[in-house]
Amino acid sequence: MKIGFLYDAVYPGIKGGGEKTLFELACELRDRGHECHFFGMHCWDGPADVVRDGLHYHAVAPNLPLYGTDGKRRIAQPLGFAWGVLTRLGRHDLKSFDLFDVHAFPFFSVPAFWLVRLLRARRLPWLLTWLEVWGRDYWTRYLGAKGVLGAWLERWCAWIAPHHLCISPTTARRLGQLLGVTERRISTIPRGFGASRDMQTLAERVPGRVVIAGRLLAYKRTDLVLRAWPAVVKDMPLASLHIVGDGPEMEALKAQADAYQVTGSVRFFGQLPEREQVLREIATAELLLQPSTREGQSTVVLEALTLGTPVLAAVGEETAVGDFLGDATATALARLDVAADAAVWAERIVRLLSNPAERATLATAGAREVAELGWREHIAPQVEQLYLRLCNPTRD
């Protein structure tokens, strides 16, 4: 098959979990004999159209900043990307493609693609991939009155797409409940995961070390952990918190750590240049925290579980992390309701740091879950079969 992926952020120019796992999917499909093309912002050095390691990259928009100073997505970025899709995607021979996998986010690009396809290649099979589903409540919390437009656009995207691919059961459930998509139009296939060569280096765990890794945005709630941290170090004076990542919240979080007088036990690393450095931080920790209220899957959680590092995560309606921690009964200690306050987080962190046997139980359950997400053995074949079915509906 000749497959097109339409997504604004392209790995490795933008190193988010969604971007990285899409890149890994394309690599797996390439290795299975398929031709994969990325259509996104110009996130790489060199010309707008380039082939690297057997993957095809096409820039349909400049590399626009994703976030404003307030940590929220800039409206200019999705509009600029949508305009690029509308004006530049049609320059490519769309009729030569067997299928397009269009990411729902950042939404404005979906009607742009729909129109270009209608004018240039109306028989081209396509599907919409959902990393998350927001729904009207979240839109209005995020943007206020302007969120009504976003909620309408999200629902319209769900209505026009012939088929939907969700990366978690939580996302699939929300797609049906909040956007009214029927079950027969939804396929649920998680993004895959596997230990790569740079995950093979063994690192000795540091007693009391806790790590958070990811972009420092408000909904990631690193501030909640900092509010909990004084109580943690009161009970465990040798505990240390490593915060890996960068983002709009960095300076506010540093000021918060200073105000709580915990700078001696909290270290900010910023964006580490090499993935192996991030993995080493996770591998040397006794616990990884994921307090985010909104996650489609959370690659860093899968990395931690692969490295044998237990996870403590927020679970709730808008985050799918709980889908990937392992059996809910066996991993009850790994789960805190999103409504849990800093005191509850502090108590659970202290309990897990104090109890190696409980940490081992969580790590073992999580490792079993990750083993079912192997790209080559499990996930890539499922995605391949879905694509083939959509290309050839008579196969059913």
Image (cartoon, rainbow, N blue to C red):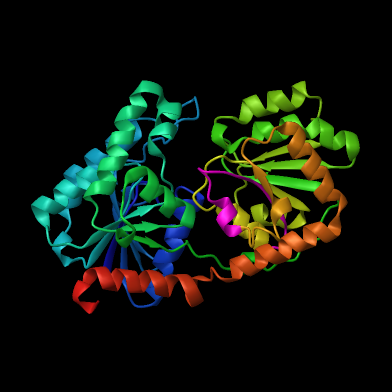
Residue 32 as seen in the image, left or right of residue 258:
left
Point 56% across, 31% down: residue: 218
Q: Is residue 142 above or below residue 279?
A: above
The answer to which of 318 and 191 lies nearer the viewer is 318
Q: Is residue 17 left or right of residue 182?
A: right
Task: Indicate the quadrant containing the N terminus: top left, top right, bottom left or bottom right.
Answer: bottom left
Q: Residue at x 61, y 66 (%)?
A: 369
Query: Most extreme residue toward the left, as rendered?
Result: 119
Q: Position of residue 312 (x, y in %)?
A: 70, 49
Horizontal placement of 103 versus 324: left or right? left
When the figure is inspected, residue 272 is found, relative to residue 356, above or below; the finding is: above
Judge whether residue 319 is colored magenta. yes
User: Left of 257 or right of it: where is 20?
Assistant: left
Q: For the point 33% across and 70% down, which residue is it?
A: 386
Answer whether residue 10 is visible to the viewer in this image.
Answer: yes
User: In percent of the image, x 28 and y 73: which residue is there?
Assistant: 388
Stretch in magenta: 307-324
Quadrant of the frame with the C terminus = bottom left
State the count of labels. Answer: 0
Q: Position of residue 375 (x, y in %)?
A: 49, 70
* As drawn, 209 above or below 195: above
- Give the image location of residue 137, x and y in percent: 42, 32
Picture quadrant of residue 57: bottom left
Quick check: is 9 in the magenta stretch? no
Tell me which corner region of the image, top left, top right, bottom left or bottom right, holds residue 26: bottom left
Residue 264 appears in view: no
Q: Whole-percent x and y of residue 141?
A: 45, 27
